[in-house]
Image (cartoon, grey):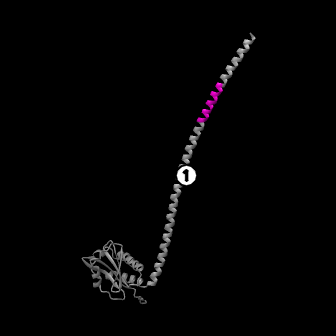
Amino acid sequence: MAAPQYYGNVHFLGVARIAGTGIVIASHSYNTETDLNGVRQVLEQPNMSMAPGKHYSFNVAQLAWHLIADDMGLIYILICKTSYPQRCAHTCLEELQRTFVAKAGDKARTAKDRSLDKACGSLLQKICQKYDNLNEIDKLASVSLKVESVKLVMQDNVDMALQNCVKLESIEKAAEELQQQAGVFKRNAHELKKRMWWKNLKMKLIVGGVILVILGIIAGIIAYMVDQNKK
């Protein structure tokens, strides 16, 4: 098996917790020598209050430190070159967190100093080797970004489709309301037309009746006058 190639990007990977003092429960120095006492001293600084899920980065002795804490009280540590991209460091820590918890489980909550070195050493070494080769990591990061961008585009399309559905539902609802209003208007118009027809019929009957009465009176007068002339 070919010996791994070192690029000098990743120097140290470790998992720690703070229980009064800094406890490095598992660690791996990648092609370097890292003073664990120095790591413990950094962890024991008064301002080392870390919120779970948040990434922290700072430089110490011309090296970049990247840390992330989780809900179990564990702190994941990456020491690398100062020029190492933060996006790659964050991805490394997230993979370390995910794989370490899967391997160590609840034992990590109470593990003593360096007690998980043997059980998790190969895991830490593989992650160091993977993220030391920045060219490969950048390729993976590029693919990941493309996948994420595709997801975002798809999500935007889904959101737009949902918005269109909402707009369509609103239009359909408005159309239904207009249709109902049109039905009411049609019924009212029909009733009004019917009332007007009856009103006009009544007026015609009244006018017709008046005319008949007048004609009857005229006919009566004429008949009376004819009768008088005969006498």
Badge 1 amino acid: Ala
Residue 151: % across, % down? 48, 70
Say if the magenta span includes residue 76.
no
**Nearer to us in this view, 174 or 226:** 226
Residue 76: % across, % down? 34, 78
Residue most extreme to the right: 230
Q: Secondary structure at mark 1?
A: helix
Residue under circle 1?
175
- Magenta stretch, main secondary structure class: helix
Asked where in the image residue 5 lies, by quadrant, the reply is bottom left
| Quarter occupied by the N terminus | bottom left
Horizontal side of 194 relative to 78 (left or right) equals right
Asked where in the image residue 185 lies, by quadrant, the reply is top right
Res. 16 visible in picture: yes
The magenta stretch is 195-210
Residue 41: % across, % down? 27, 82
